[in-house]
Image (cartoon, grey):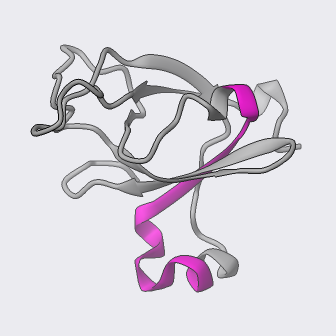
Amino acid sequence: MRTLTRNKRVFYLCRRNPASASVKTFVTPVTISANFDIARSEVDIMTFGENYMNYARSNVDNVVGGLFTRGDRIYLTEPSPFNSLCNDADYEVDGVLPSINNTEIVYNRLSGSNVT
């Protein structure tokens, strides 16, 4: 049920620019279609603690999971115009957890974002 195409949501991944070491800059966003779930269950409360409301996760296949690295930024709506600092992004990738069949991505909401 979690991997059905009809349940997938489109969001935009801004990968960190590896050439910029001193300042975090990002490359042009890539469109990703995946399941995006806000953390709200009892297991999430035990995992993330009292700040569970600031976390989200998605399960993707390993091919798409290979695009994510810790520190990348996520937009839930298309960024226009694109800012190379991504200071108005909604989430930041907090963890990438690969397994045999799929990869779980954990996102941390950035302060000041208007995501509900």
Please provide percent x and percent y for residue 42: 67, 81
Q: Residue at x 28, y 54 (%)?
A: 110
Q: Hey, which residue is sitting farthest left in the picture?
A: 22
Quarter of the figure with the N terminus: top right
Q: Is residue 115 above or below residue 11?
A: below
Frontmost residue, 67 versus 44? 67
Vertical side of 64 occupied by 68: above or below: below
Asked if residue 49 lies in the magenta stretch, the reply is yes
Q: Quadrant of residue 29?
A: top left
The chief SS type of the magenta part is: helix
Classify residue 56 as left or right of residue 82. right
- Residue drawn at point x = 29 percent, y = 19 percent: 27
- Up-down relation of residue 113 to residue 20 (above or below): below
- The residue range painted magenta reads 45-63
> Which residue is more in the foreground, 41 or 74?
74
Residue 41 sits in which quadrant? Answer: bottom right
As drawn, is 21 to the left or to the right of 76?
A: left
Q: Position of residue 53 (x, y in %)?
A: 44, 69
Residue name at image x 52 percent, y 36 percent: 68
Instruction: Locate residue 17, reporting x and y percent.
Output: 28, 26
User: From the viewer's perspective, is 64 left or right of 81?
Assistant: right
Membership of 38 in magenta stretch: no
Residue displayed at 22% across by 58% down: 111
Q: How many marks?
A: 0
